[in-house]
Image: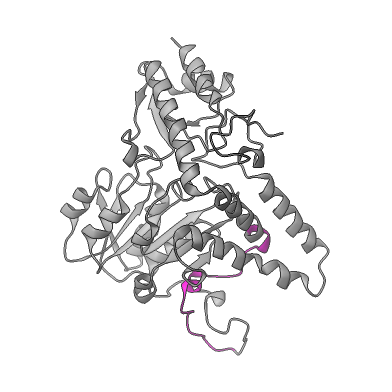
Amino acid sequence: MAHSGGDDGGLPGYAEHFEAAPGYLDFARYGPPSRDVLAATADALGRSARADHDTVNDLMRADLRARQAAARLAGTDAEHTVLLPNASTGLFQAAFGIPAGTVLVPAADFPANHYPWRRAAAAGLAQPRWLPGPPTPEAVRGALTDDVVALSISAVDFRTGYRADLAALRDVIGPDRLLVTDAMQAFGVAELPWQAADVVVTGGQKWLRASWSTGFAALSDRALERLAPTLTGWTGVDDVALFDDAEHPAAAGAARLSITNLSPVAAAAFAAALDVVESVGVAAIEARVAALVDGLITAVRGCGGEILSATAPARRAGIVSFRLPGIPTATVAKALQAHAITPTVRPDSLRLSPHASTPTSTVAQVAAALDSLR
């Protein structure tokens, strides 16, 4: 059953696609998928179980549908877009394809944006230089040296919800360096100038609500020119269906990031999830989430909580991180869970991340849970 209770937040019918509990505020960790995704998955898997001579080719057409939808949302086209099973695959492709030199990476970024650069450095390729603090334009400008070939950041920080200024960062690093962006905590919930980046990668299991084993990368012309096809697999080359025992050239477009065939079932799920996003638009989703974040910040502060997230509207997304001074995180988590609220629980803080389907009444549930600790 849908849980909207008439509270559509200005998005008529949107919440009706979902079954997640009203108090689920853990979208920055995992976004429960829609009924559309469940139906697309069941249909594709069911058809595969009854396969005939047309089935596999028909199922694989979901790849193009999903790429086209992802490309529209990223402001590019299908030739510059490739489906991937997760964001990490795209980040490893960037790290092992980037020209030798130094890559600036925030020291406190999510580990998915660390290990590709560590592994590339160990292989004698690009070397990471760790940036302290958030990747503000001023911090990046101060770290630039002639050997810097790229900047790799999260579009939205997983801890604080800090929203990077992609357009300003593009201006700071200039046209001769690559901007690599992990869009996991932003894509589908925050309108950002994705075309300012050269590599945009994301998985579909969080804000896109497509579940696991879904994602994509979008590459600029500059990235296609400069990234070596170091990890290109057999499906990322020209004449992929010609088995002539020869090495084929890497594909001209973003398909060169492909290593092997992905699940057409996952592609169908991803296409369905992207259709739901497009049906209401990212701007409307973002506005609804922003209003919920405002309410959650007010509720946490009203109960004596310390906000750890970015609070300036222009620099925040859908994440509210906080702690209650003097009260163990585990105790706060139990109080929230007792009031049917699902947060992300960290050793030193908690994180609340609502989506556009979250009813406004959930904010009052959070306030009641925190007030019970006073």
Q: Is residue 349 visible?
A: no
Where residue 297 appears, x then y in whole percent?
40, 26
Q: Residue at x 48, y 68 (%)?
A: 77
Whether 262 is among the magenta residues is: yes
Q: Residue at x 63, y 60 (%)?
A: 267
Q: 85 or 310, which lies in front?
A: 310
Where residue 171 appears, x then y in whole percent?
23, 59
User: Which quarter of the rendering shows the C terminus?
Assistant: top left
345 sits to left or right of 43: left
Where residue 84 appears, x then y in whole percent?
53, 62
Whether 85 is among the magenta residues is: no
299 sits to left or right of 66: left
Q: Residue at x 26, y 51 (%)?
A: 130
21 relative to 29, above or below = above
Q: Is residue 366 visible?
A: yes
176 relative to 238, above or below = above
User: What is the basis of the colouring in this image?
Assistant: one colour
Magenta span: 245-266
